[in-house]
Image (cartoon, coloured by chain):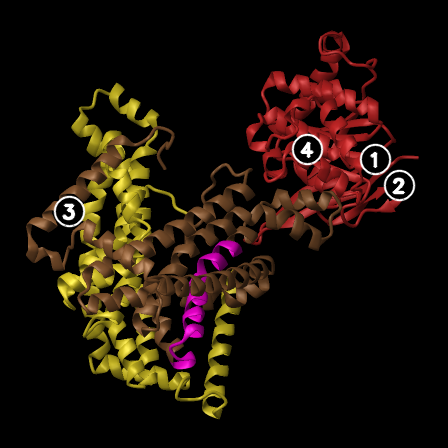
Amino acid sequence: MRDSRLNGFLFLLGLLGVWELVAEAGWVNPLIVPPFSKILSSFFSLIESGQIPWQILASLKRSVVGYLLAAAIFIPLGVLMGLFDAFHRGLEVIIEMLRPIPPPVVVPVAMLFFGLEDEMKIFVICFSCAWPILLNTIDGVRNIDRVLLDTARTFGLSRQRIMWRVIVPACSPQIMTGLRVSLPIMLILVVISEMVGSTDGIGYFILDSQRRFKVAQMYAGMLALAILGYGLNQLFNLLSRLLLPWHERKVD
Amino acid sequence: MNDSRTFNWSGWLALALLLFMWEYGSRLNPKLQLYIPSISQILVTLGQLISSGQVTAHLLITLRRFVEGYLLAAVVGVSVGVILGYFRFAHSLLEMLIEFLRPMPSVAIIPVAILLLGIGDSMITAVTVYASMWPILVNTIDGVRYIERTLVDTGRTFGLSRPRILWHVILPAASRYIVTGLRVSLSIALILVTTAEMIVGSQGLGFFILDEERSLHSSAMYAGIILVALLGYCLNRLFLLLENRGMKWRRGMIAREAI
Amino acid sequence: MPVLEVQNLSKTYRQLGGETTFAIGNISCQVEPKEFVSFVGPSGCGKTTLLMSIAGLIAPTSGRVMLHGREVTGPPPKLVLVFQEFNKSLFAWRSVLGNVRFGIEARGNRTREAEFRARSLIELVGLKDFENHYPWELSGGMQQRVAIARALAYEPEVLLMDEPFGSLDALTRLELEDTLLRLWEELGTTILFITHDIEEAIYLSDRVWVLSRRPSQIIEELRIDFSRPRNQVATRAEARFMEIRNRIYRRISNERAV
């Protein structure tokens, strides 16, 4: 196994090397694909100057708020819908109507209401992350093993305690799945909303760099974005291991 | 999904109530009209746009870009996925590259694509292919890689050659994973097409919706959104239809939903 | 002239951590055409490895397997293995009929006659009404019958069976034992059977080999000559049945205790 990782690593290095040579030799238009070394140096100087950290922070700020808002609204809603079938049926049609809306087209609506402010992005992210969170929560609650609930009741637990001691832990892996699936959605939508209507943020930065033909900077921004995505993933995995140490999960 | 055999009275009632409140809320408060025009107004606008053919052109453009991007992504994703799933060495080479590219949201590729391909159809198709390819690729690789050893051995004990095992055993067994990947990509493709249209402004429903918003024609904007949602819905139903016909044997297994 | 010969077969595995597992020590035996023979042994003694080696799915570390006088270096054409985990071996995307036809198609035969053969085999195993069902709709016993029908559709000369009834309930097991014997008598296939159920081995076979624990070797060979057709009540009631059974049981217990 270690062998294969080494292979992959070497191959990646090889590719980067080829990129470097090809770009330096001018076989590709260096205005469109600059040498990787140039991108790296641009990346580091942008970090030093604080540009990239600042843009990343701007994006993070609004995305995390949107994400947490979605969680705060739609997890409880999902639990309610999972527990009470009547409630679920009542909201079902409305949800099915809203779901097919591709998240990006919500951006103009949000712009109508909030202009280009942070609220606009928060709204978009909240809307987009809603469905995975909601649906997974509903699923998680509904799929709680009947046996588990019956066991709790034979132990004479009150409804309150069943709620917190049995239901919440039992469906939390599935809720986690919803949260995990929403994470890349959050990132995608913050980039989209920044590219369509914003004055800052990493998405805006990348597009803006392209428009100004600052190509190395553009790629540096993409690199920063990839690192951000990777970092958020790792952070999430860490948190989920801490919060749900008892749950075995497939290695992703 | 809920049991759709009994008609969901309460659900439709709730929707009707919501629409009712929307309609009258909007009418009673003219200031709100700009942001939230009444349903009737939106529908009237929708009717006008369709009959005048204005929005139909955009719809067809978006649809065409979607179909091109999605189908190409499917072909590339499945073929490369099968190769990488089957040949461990090839996969080990590319594994790290894939791991590095995946966390980056595919939409970030749009500016690069603009540089390389300009702001026309080819750019939009290209970014759609790039983004839609990932779930298909990843799920196909998984489906082919994690095939039950016993299944392959069954093929072998019946004297099948390696290519025949791939075709008769591995691919059918991996098909439910592949189909899951194809299903996830359906929404992603639509997302990318509309996003690219918004950013680049070259016709299509995405552009239309944004454009109407900019001109503060909110009814038209909402009308456009309804259309694109309908488009997405129809594409989904079509997919489910095809899936059900091809996959009678499924028992509802869950494969990895990678975005 | 024996149809199958195992000559000094041994198999060792080297694990990832550097550990070596000696699965099969040294096994030699011969199987005559149309015989029904069984291997019994303590669990983990390498029975599956043995069968996989004979089937040509695993390469032996030393020794060899001869089928009709020719060495087995890969899955040989006249031999087929029925796996223990039938639910992982059946093709979920094919119906019962489709699965059984696969056995025929694997032979390169796609004629109408092939379809007819498939249907009659399905009837032979008692699944006539389930031709168009999919594996997930069937019980464990039924699934294993499909696997057996599929294997027989291949018209093998030698049929290897790896604890085929191990995961089924007791009553289904008895039923399938008789079904298998019926098929065997009708088709004249040579069968090598692996089981942990001593009485099953005795009931079914002409000969039983008792295996030691790992690295496995044959520690006893017993000839079973109860009259055929065997009967679940009569055969098992014979005094000698219990004698043989106890004898094998004691041998295996010794192996486990060691």
| Residue beneath disc 1 | C157
Q: Amino acid at mark 1?
A: Glu
Per the model, the C-alpha gap separating discs 4 and 3 is: 58 Å
Pointers 1 and 4 within a single chain:
yes
Residues tagged by mark 2 and mark 3 found on one chain of the structure: no
Chain B shade in the render: brown
Q: Chain letter for mark 2, please.
A: C
Of badges 1 and 4, the one in the foreground is 4
How far apart are labels 2 and 4 at the CA level? 31 Å
Q: Secondary structure at mark 4?
A: helix
The tag earlier along the polypeptide, 2 or 4, is: 2
The residue indicated by pointer 4 is C97
The hue of chain A in the figure is: yellow
Which residue lies under the disc numbered 3?
B23
Q: Is mark 2 in CB contact (under 8 Å) with mark 1?
A: yes
Which residue does the numbered mark 2 point to in the structure image? Answer: C68
Chain C rendered in what hue? red
Q: Residue at x 74, y 13 (%)?
A: C241
Side of B175 where C149 appears, left or right: right
